[in-house]
Image (cartoon, coloured by chain):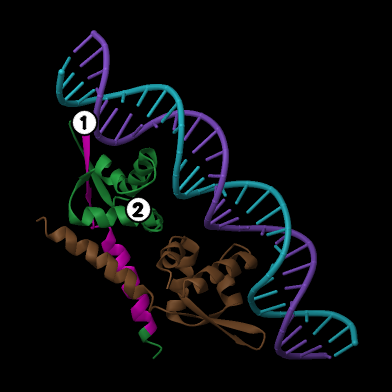
Chain colours: A green, B brown, C purple, D cyan
Amino acid sequence: MKMNLVYKALADPTRRDILNLLKNRDLTAGEIADHFRISKPSISHHLNLLKQADLVHAEKEGQYIHYSINTTVLQDVLTWLLSLQEGKGKRE
Amino acid sequence: MKMNLVYKALADPTRRDILNLLKNRDLTAGEIADHFRISKPSISHHLNLLKQADLVHAEKEGQYIHYSINTTVLQDVLTWLLSLQEGKGKRE
DNA sequence: TAAACAATTAGATAATTTTCTAAATAACAA
DNA sequence: TTGTTATTTAGAAAATTATCTAATTGTTTA
């Protein structure tokens, strides 16, 4: 897993908002786009980056594509952030 | 605190490496730069972004500037990441 | 089949980011 | 004071990213 893609994906506020939406429930691409003022193709692009980072999973069902969050890749981020905090401790 | 600056700061691998270095001990700008192949001004720029995100603190001592990590801003990131994971749970 | 709908892909542009070299600032040491 | 060292600032080029409209693909429905 290319962790850089994960950090890059998390760097954009629109994408973080998308993850916040998906935290509550799975949504189709259109439902996600409805929450934003930017165009559908732009949202599609953001979804693609989230997918490449493996932060979301896309499942096609008929003409819809259902997106769901995948938090497993966040574990490594969490671990790293905690390691930064722990390191700090040794100086105090 | 502008959290977007924090996420942006964490998105770059060089800056993440800098934080990894500072986890062990405080370092001067020059010592940090010595760990990388990119130019000092570029490192200086990265340090500035980290400082704006409040992820590092800079203290001038004579002609040197000592950089130290500040992990307090990471707490909000941590909390958000955990909230994403928890939300996931409710669907299982 | 034809029209409508959901979503993506293509291609372009604008904005942002990364990086560089050269120059400036500030502190130290001879 | 003059030269050296540590670091940043300025300004520009190159690379990446975010966004748009138009076109395409695939599915559903009349």
Residue to which mark 2 is pinned: A15
Q: Nearer the viewer, residue A50 or D6?
A: A50
Compared with A63, A57 (above or below) is: below
Residue A10 falls in image quadrant? bottom left
Q: Which mark is residue B33?
A: none
**Label 2, residues with CA under 10 Å away: few <14, some 14-19, many ≥20:** some
Residue A5 lies, with reference to residue D24, above or below; the image says below
Say the numbered circle drawn on residue A63.
1
Q: Residue C17 at x, y = what percent?
A: 53, 57
Q: Main secondary structure of the magenta part?
A: helix
How would you rate the neighbour count of disc 1 (Cα within 10 Å): few for under 14, some for 14-19, many for 20 or more? few
Q: Quadrant of residue A82?
A: bottom left
- The answer to whether D7 appears left or right of A19 in the picture is right
Location of residue A89 by image quarter: bottom left
Badge 1: chain ID: A
Q: Is residue B51 left or right of residue A20?
A: right
Residue C16 vs residue D22, the one in the foreground: D22
Indicate which disc, 1 or 2, sits on the residue closer to the N terminus: 2
- Residue A87 inside the magenta-drawn segment: yes
Instruction: Report the amino acid beneath label 2.
Output: Arg
Tell me where residue A14 appears, x and y as whole percent. Answer: 37, 53
Q: Magenta span covers which residues?
A: A64-88
Where disc 2 sits, the SS reads: helix
Instruction: Please tell me whether residue B84 is drawn above or below residue A88 in the rendered image.
Output: above
Residue B15, can we see it? yes
From the top left corner, tell me how far across and down residue B75 is, in percent. 33, 75
Chain ID at mark 2: A
Amino acid at circle 1: Gln
In the drawing, does residue B30 fall left or right of residue B73?
A: right
Image point (43%, 69%), residue name? B2
Instruction: Give the distance between the C-alpha atoms of the residues marked 1 and 2, in whole angstroms.
Output: 23 Å
